[in-house]
Amino acid sequence: MPSKPLVGVTMGDPAGVGPEVTVKALTELGIYSVCRPLVVGDAAVLARANEMLETPLIVRPVARVNDARFEFGTMDVLDLANVELGRLETGKISAMAGKAAVEYVIQAVQLVQAGEMDAMVTGPINKEAINLGGYHYIGHTEILADLTHTTRLTTMLASGPLRVTHVTRHVPLGAVSDLITRDRVLETILVTAKGLRQFGIEQARLGVAALNPHGGEGGLLGREEIEEIAPAVEKARKMGINAQGPFPGDSIFFRAIDGEFDAVVAMYHDQGHIPIKVYDFQGSYTVTLGLPILRTSVDHGTAFDIAWKGMANSRSMLVAIQAAALLARQKEK
């Protein structure tokens, strides 16, 4: 691999903020100093976003990866030409936009699998839109698992020194307790420890969060810690993983920020997402651990309420691209 990895960036839902944050990110010289970025999307949509933002970028459609020049000031776009601009209603959910967004992901995955790209970064998609478009998934993770035939994976959120994975993600809060089992907790610990090796952390220090307030108070506030979480942590330790816990959710994230843990294993979606986004919402990103390919992503949605108004902050896209480049270089060491 050349000194600068080739990173594919999917532009996300055409009706959302994806095209805007993609264009803004690629106006940054620093991106070109760490990687060779290639956008996978619709060149006409990106040209319109570029015109709206009045940047000096030149949008350059290409048909193949080898046609890209990777020159600062020119945004190379692997053009799928799958959006009818006359029908695109910005800031609104649509089947056309949802279908297009998934097609960018499919194309990027295929290129990374073929070795034509070293990593991929995904822009935001909308669950309702992709389902209207004929792709029945609840998010990127499920799409990627299907495309790569991966069963053991988890999404890690990162913001500054804080990294968090989740035992459960997109499920109702009332269903979480039944899903906190020894096997699920152990699997998340193992995937997290293995995934952190991508960051050069060979012996990760993992803090495992409790589910209940005050860690269950010895069973008074719930028995998941005693019956499921603690046994999983103990088994992980016997397997050579430096895992500790369960620790109460109201203190474990501070301890991680303070340097005690390399990552925290959270029990449910909001338990892990809230501290990440409070710490630095705009500077957070995600990494899918357990995949045979490298994938990072912005840590925000399509934001239809501010889409195509020039208001979207591109920092999450910037850090996601930088992280993908770092991981690609780390993989080659």
Image (cartoon, grey):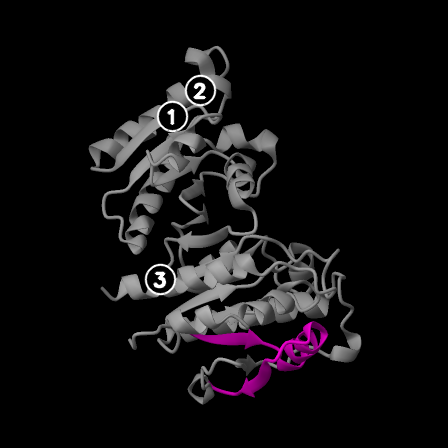
Q: Which residue lies at the image location 45% right of the left edge and 86% below the top edge?
A: 69
Residue 159 drawn above or below residue 45: above
Earlier in the chain: of badge 1 and badge 3, it is 1
Which quadrant would residue 145 be assigned to in this image? bottom left
Q: Are marks 3 and 2 in contact (CB under 8 Å)?
A: no
Query: Looking at the picture, how far across and down is residue 194, in whole percent?
Result: 29, 48
Residue 313 drawn above or below residue 196: below
Q: Are marks 1 and 2 in contact (CB under 8 Å)?
A: yes
Q: Which residue lies at the image location 32% right of the left edge and 25% below the top edge?
A: 231
Pointer 1: residues within 10 angstroms few (<14), some, or many (20+)? many
Estimate the spatial distance between the alpha carbons at disc 1 and disc 2, rounded to whole Å.
Answer: 7 Å
In this image, 99 relative to 231: left or right? right
Q: Which residues are magenta?
A: 36-64
Residue 3 can be seen, yes or no:
yes
Q: Secondary structure at mark 3?
A: helix
Per the rendering, the mark at residue 246 is 1
**Front-lying residue, 87 or 143:** 87
Pointer 2: residues within 10 angstroms few (<14), some, or many (20+)? many
Q: Which residue lies at the image location 59% right of the left edge and 53% below the top edge?
A: 300
Query: Looking at the picture, how far across and down is residue 146, in whole percent?
Result: 47, 60
Residue to which mark 2 is pinned = 215
Estimate the spatial distance between the alpha carbons at disc 3 and disc 2, rounded to whole Å.
Answer: 36 Å
Query: Looking at the picture, how far across and down is residue 281, in whole percent?
Result: 56, 47
Looking at the rendered structure, the kind of residue marked 1 is: Pro
Pointer 3: residues within 10 angstroms few (<14), some, or many (20+)? some
Looking at the rendered structure, the kind of residue marked 2 is: Gly
Query: Looking at the picture, how far across and down is residue 5, in whole percent?
Result: 36, 72
Per the rendering, the mark at residue 326 is 3
